[in-house]
Amino acid sequence: MKDRVSGLELIGQYAGLSTNFGHTVVTDLTGASVFAERARFPGHGVIVMGCVDQQPTPARALIKDIDDWAELQRAIEGVIALCGAAFVETDMRAHRNPTRMRTIKRATLDLVRRFRSLCPICERPGFAITKRLSGLPCSWCGGPTLALKADVYSCEGCGYREERPVKAATADPGQCGECNP
Ligand SMILES: [Zn+2]
Ligand SMILES: [Zn+2]
């Protein structure tokens, strides 16, 4: 999930004030209203998602096409009741975001796509690290160590999983239980 967050920040810098892309985690209606106003809701759409550990959790709740403040309030209250917090983000689908339609160029769109970390199979946003695998081989004895071997990315939508190995091929013997107990 870190990738997703830093990606959003990068987009913010890149696209500057010409876009209203952003997100926030709220635990009450006031926070949601402040964000929505800044995002120029209801002229611009916002999406409300479930939220666990400060991260968007669309598998718990995902509410799009919110047309007015009453609907937004219902969505926020429902999600907070369910998760304790709600993840709110501006809706970047073009028909819900006139700013985007007017100003974002193709390069920015590519960035958005890349950094929103979509599932390569079903394209659901939030394809992220859900597990870290240890067991990188020791550079002396070749046995498994406590060092990180790979990150596991997975999609909450379709269940697709992908292991991405770390750059290092071997671990320092200091992390090996055999060589350095
Ligand atoms: Zn997927
Ligand atoms: Zn070893």
Image (cartoon, grey):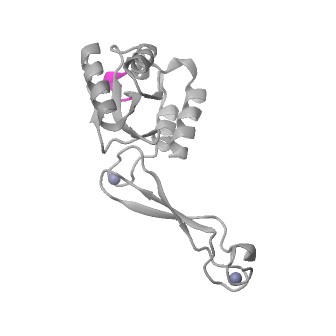
Relative to residue 80, is residue 130 drawn left or right?
right
Relative to residue 8, is residue 95 drawn left or right?
left
**24, above or below 40, in the image:** below
Question: Which residue is the extreme one toward the bottom?
Answer: 141
Region in magenta: 92-97
**74, above or below 82, in the image:** above
**45, above or below 139, in the image:** above
Q: Nearer the viewer, residue 60 or 66?
A: 60
Q: Nearer the viewer, residue 134 or 66?
A: 134
What residue sits 57% from the left and 39% below the top? 6
Q: Quadrant of residue 68?
A: top left
What residue sits 26% from the left and 26% below the top? 65
Q: Quadrant of residue 161?
A: bottom left
Residue 145 in picture, x, y percent from top left: 63, 75
Residue 125 in picture, x, y percent from top left: 39, 43
Q: Nearer the viewer, residue 133 or 39?
A: 133
Residue 83 in picture, x, y percent from top left: 34, 37
Residue 71 in picture, x, y percent from top left: 24, 19
In the picture, which quadrant includes the C terminus? Answer: bottom right
Relative to residue 172, is residue 4 drawn left or right?
left
Relative to residue 82, is residue 113 drawn left or right?
right
> For the image shown, how many numbered marks are present on the structure?
0
Q: Quadrant of residue 59?
A: top left
**45, above or below 163, in the image:** above
Magenta stretch: includes residue 158: no
